[in-house]
Amino acid sequence: MSDHILTDSQIAALTQLRRRLHQAPEISGAEAASADAISQFLRATSPDQIVEGLGGHGLAFVYDSGQPGPHVMFRAELDALPIQEQTGLDYASQTAGVAHLCGHDGHMAILAGLGLWLGGNRPATGRVILLFQPAEETGAGARAVLNDPKFATLRPDWAFALHNMPGMALGTVAVGAGPASCASVGLRLRFQGREAHASLPETGASPAPALAAVMAEVARHATAPPMGPDFRLATLCHLNMGVPAFGIAPAQAEAFVTLRTVSDSALERFEQDICAFAQAHAKGVKLEVTRHDHFNATHNDPQAATHVSRACTALGVQNGEFALPMRASEDFGAFSAGTRTALFFLGAGEGHPALHNRDYDFPDALITTGVAIFAQILTGIHDETRKHPHPKAAFSPSGVAPFRRSDPRP
């Protein structure tokens, strides 16, 4: 299969779609217009089923052969970031304080391109599901989709997603079996004491000692150790205490802390340790902890990762230099609980602005490459199914596999 499987007019239409989405970004949970734009674009491909309102504003397009065979899902994200863009592009965001600075506009264009290809290349067996997922940036979208009753009939055997990655050579790919992105959670620790006159602090209950202890404990985990099963990283993101006055000893304090690990089980233990430590030092003050932006770890199934590798080999796509797993989180991991999944990274250029930077923009040149890889993955799965029509029992994970560093090309 060539990496040019789309016509020039299709590529132009996808580029235009990508830039239109870029101009009108929507934050997590508010992606109604983006979903509508995708829906209007792909209806012309005559999908056999369109499922809207998945986990919020998510939507899925199903191309069904009507014959037994593999159910394969490809996923892109709908949402943008609450950051002001500073690219100076003529198609820059027209929404103040919101921008596609992670490349989700490009990921949507790639998945829409796969839909264009499927419109003329229907699956002979099984079905293909194109999922446009909401609320990726907050870690809430994947679980919302999985918990939506409408998704029950769509549950795939295989699921694939890509993420563009600045710092990697343009158009190269990194993938491997095992951990692909870290689990993470944001903890908001609120301490409530009692104010006092600054000259008589002993008559109040200050949260300062508890907050200082938490800061010191977080600092112990603020330098990332080498990746491995015991990897722990804590980042202090925000602090606030008291009121801006010199005559009042404080009563309130809060800290925003983000925790990261390689696996979900390790994150659970890390969270328990931090919360227990904070509680033990909250002497004389009340502690309240709330959880935010929880992301599951993404764990690549070896067979799924191999399908990505074989697709890249067939297309002549080169290996990208990237350390797996990605330290950042990606809201794709929840799908790996009952599906063979693979998340791979597509190089956006070695000197390209970093993700979430105000001057970032998705490289349009990656659209055709991404579409070709997705299509070749699908071709490879169907080829293997024809060779082995009676696979073993359905995949049923038994927890997170031991950490092992994989070569980007298994």
Image (tube, rainbow, N blue to C red):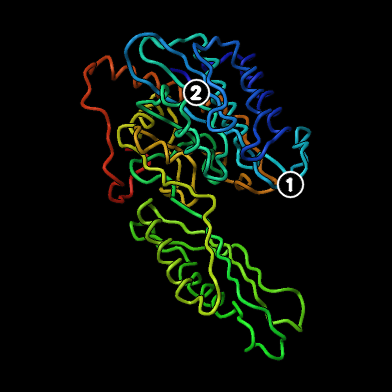
Residue 53 higher or lower than 292, as above or below: above
Residue count near mark 2 (Cα–Cα under 10 Å), binned few <14, some 14–19, many ≥20: many
Question: In the rendered structure, are the residues bearing label 1 and label 2 in contact, judged by CB atoms less than 8 Å apart?
Answer: no
For the C terminus, give its image quadrant. top left
x 49%, y 43%: residue = 330
Question: Which residue lies at the image location 49% right of the left edge and 21% below the top edge?
Answer: 3
Quadrant assignment for the N terminus: top left
Q: Secondary structure at mark 2?
A: strand
Binning the other alpha carbons within 10 Å of mark 1 as few (below 14), some (14 to 19) or many (20 upward) gives: some
Circle 2: residue type: Leu
The one of 259 and 2 positioned closer to us in this rendering: 259
Q: Which amino acid type is shown beneath numbered disc 1?
A: Gln
**Mark 2 lies on residue:** 130
Picture layout, residue 215 above or below residue 37: below
For the residue pair 316 and 258, the one nearer the viewer reads as 258
Give percent across and percent down for residue 184.
47, 53
Quarter of the rendering containing residue 73: top left
- Judge whether 261 appears above or below 244 on screen: above
The residue shown at (63%, 47%) is: 356
Residue 154 occupies which quadrant of the picture? top left
The residue indicated by pointer 1 is: 84
Q: Left or right: where does residue 69 sit relative to residue 143?
A: left
Q: CA distance from mark 1 to mark 2?
A: 30 Å
318 vs 247, nearest the viewer: 247
Residue 205, image x and y in percent? 60, 81
